[in-house]
Image: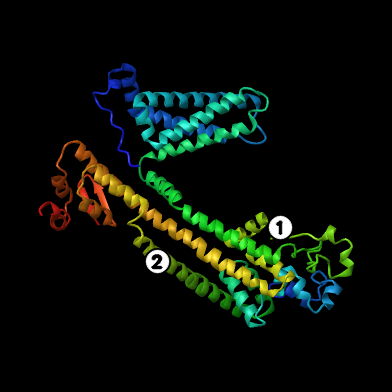
Amino acid sequence: MITSTAKFEKDDRYYNNALTRVCFYTVNSPIFNGFIIFIIVLNTIVLSMDGYPPQEKEVQQVFDVANVVFTVIFTAELIVKVIGLGTSGFLADKFNIFDGLIVIISLVEMALAGDDEGSQGGALSALRAFRLFRIFKIFRAGDLRTLLDSIAFTVVTIKDYTILLALFIYVFALLGMSIFAGKVTFDEHGDFIPITSAGKCEDGKLLKNNEDIAESPRTNYDHVTWAMLAVFEIMIGENWNGVMYDHMRTIGSATCVYFIALVCMGNIIMLNLFLAILLGNFDRARNFGEKKKIFDAFGGLNDMGYDLLVSITNLFDDPDLIKYIEDKVLSDKKE
Amino acid sequence: MCPINRWCGSLAEASRSNDPIYALSNELKLDYYRDAKIEDLNFSITNFDNLPQAFLTIFQCITLEGWIDVTNMFEDSYTVWFVEVYFLLCIIVCSFFVLNLTIAVMLLKYEEYDKENQDGSEHMQELHEYGEKIGLPLRFTEFLIDQDNIQISLKGLKVL
């Protein structure tokens, strides 16, 4: 949904309320926004001070107090925004919803960490790290916003590719399992143990303590989860030849066909398809953002009561283009 | 000591050397298929002994995975300058050019195919609905959507 920027109409009943008016001006003031960005950066610095071994107790206490102060400030900011912009105006910006979620997570963490003072909140203090995402707020203006929008645009449109990739990995994992599962094992010296289809060793000496010494390599096809990991690893191209050698030594030279096919289709085609989608989407996101701005501009003109047909020709500065638009694009008005 | 102009220490070198530091165990030395058991020699898989194996060696080098090991191996067992030139040519021609050209063709084809299907995408649909909502003429909405490169600034709209 395209939502034009939240408008605060003068005849709105909220506007007559002194508290709302103060909040509205506070939200729009550059000092307030600068202060919030300063707090976000400070919060990032304080969070980065954490480490192992832990800081001295006095220092740690300062950080704990700082964290509570940050949570209180962010909560206050949220309340001021909700009052100042109104609920619908607040929800219109996706960043506000994100900020709200961060504040709720922080409050939950603070409430739960208060119960057990000694354990420092444990896993729940990890939720504190979510506040780091607020640093994206700095990106709200300028080209970085476009970049962030492109990433969001791509993530949304990439779902078909993700399904295809998952299916591809699954198919190759099952194919690999049907060929390799349980057959690729090595002893403690790194020599492979030939195992017959019945699961017994061909070599009589190894047979009696086969189960003790036979080990699958880390990248194996013994179970579907490991197989999928192996396929992913080979697809990325990391040490795929080493995995291939292991399997060629144990099963036979012909297994290299499987690995070559996987590298060709996975690495060269699938991963570059991702690149293609990313590049295409980046272009498209920028294009879409620019067009949205134009439509927003026309929407604004329409709201202010201008005649759109007059505005259209006035907005272009190229005379040939204006003629083209008048003749071809807007000609249905003349007919 | 290692002679000048040679790189020592690899197992290919060691098998020829009389130096006890590099000497392999007697058991391994007598084994005819010794190389196939040595990890540093890639289990004797990467060589040019026959066409399929040569193909595999070259393919591995093109994917840039472990190619320097293969190169070093052949440098130790053959003329250094020739192996260097051969593998560098292989990397530059096959990997940099041929493989990346394949990728370029893929990107191009994808973009072509993508452009054909772009009109029906939900984002373009969204723009259509938005144009209808604010009362823009339908043809002008379509004109705006069709433009690949259109910019808005304080001076007005500009088609690049």
Q: Position of residue A94 (x, y in %)?
A: 40, 37
Kindly identify the residue that appears in the image at 51 percent across and 62 percent down: A270
Q: Is residue A259 visible?
A: yes
Q: Which quadrant of the figure contains the C terminus of chain A?
A: bottom left
Task: Name the residue that disc number 2 marks.
Answer: B108
- Amino acid type at mark 2: Leu
Horizontal arrangement in the rendering, residue A294 relative to residue B18 (left or right): left
Q: Chain of mark 2?
A: B
Task: Name the residue that disc number 1 marks.
Answer: A218
Q: Is residue A26 visible?
A: no
Q: Are marks 1 and 2 on the same chain?
A: no
Residue B52, above or below A40: below
Whole-number angstrom distance, CA of label 1 to CA of label 2: 39 Å
Residue lying at the far left of the rendered structure: A334
Q: Which quadrant of the figure contains the N terminus of chain A?
A: top left
> Front-most of A208 and A174?
A174
Kindly identify the residue that appears in the image at 54 percent across and 66 percent down: A265
Residue A118, above or below A170: above
Horizontal arrangement in the rendering, residue B120 relative to residue A266 (left or right): left
> Front-most of B144 and B38?
B144
Confirm or deny contact between disc 1 and disc 2 (CB under 8 A). no
Which type of secondary structure does the marked residue at label 2 adopt? Answer: helix
Q: Position of residue B25 (x, y in %)?
A: 84, 71
Residue lying at the far bottom of the rendered structure: B50
Q: Position of residue A85 (x, y in %)?
A: 34, 27
Which type of secondary structure does the marked residue at label 1 adopt? Answer: loop
- Amino acid type at mark 1: Arg
Which numbered marker is on residue B113?
none
